[in-house]
Image: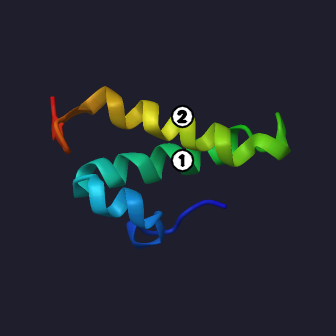
Amino acid sequence: MPYVTTDQLPASLRERLPAHAQEIFLAAFNNAWRSHARDNPERLEEIAHRIAWAAVKRKFRKIGDAWVAI
């Protein structure tokens, strides 16, 4: 299900990602959710998460335990 705010993201994401990365994740997830709703409904959440992570990884890299902007 799409997220309205970053406060609704899974705790694991909120704890690990910086605020801007969370915003990127939220926007990409929601866009993917809308775009792929009819393609494969049973895998929709998985697809949206993969797309959202790819969007985050375009702007951030994990160095050690921290996600930093590139």
Furthest-front residue in this view? 64
* Label 1 residue SS: helix
Amino acid on which disc 1 is placed: Phe
Residue found 47% across the figure and 63% down from its top: 10
- In the rendered image, residue 20, in percent from the top left (x then y), is placed at 25, 51
* Label 2 residue SS: helix
- In the rendered image, residue 23, in percent from the top left (x then y), is placed at 35, 54
Left or right: 26, with 31 as reference point: left
Displayed quadrant of residue 5: bottom left
- In the rendered image, residue 70, in percent from the top left (x then y), is placed at 15, 28
Left or right: 26, with 45 as reference point: left
Left or right: 18, with 32 as reference point: left
Tell me how far mark 2 sits from mark 1, CA to CA.
Answer: 7 Å
> On the image, numbered disc 1 is attached to which residue?
29
Amino acid on which disc 2 is placed: Ile
Instruction: Confirm or deny contact between disc 2 and disc 1 (CB under 8 A).
Output: yes
Residue found 34% across the figure and 54% down from its top: 22
Q: Is residue 9 above or below residue 7?
A: above
**Mark 1 crowdedness (10 Å alpha carbons): few <14, some 14-19, many ≥20:** many
- In the rendered image, residue 63, in percent from the top left (x then y), is placed at 16, 34
Earlier residue among tags 2 and 1: 1
Of residues 37 and 41, the one nearer the viewer is 41
Of residues 67 and 33, the one nearer the viewer is 67
Residue found 49% across the figure and 43% down from its top: 28
Residue found 83% across the figure and 37% down from its top: 40
* Colour scheme: rainbow
Left or right: 53, with 23 as reference point: right
> On the image, numbered disc 2 is attached to which residue?
51
The image's mark for residue 11 is none
Displayed quadrant of residue 38: top right
Q: How many marks?
A: 2
Q: Is residue 11 above or below residue 47?
A: below
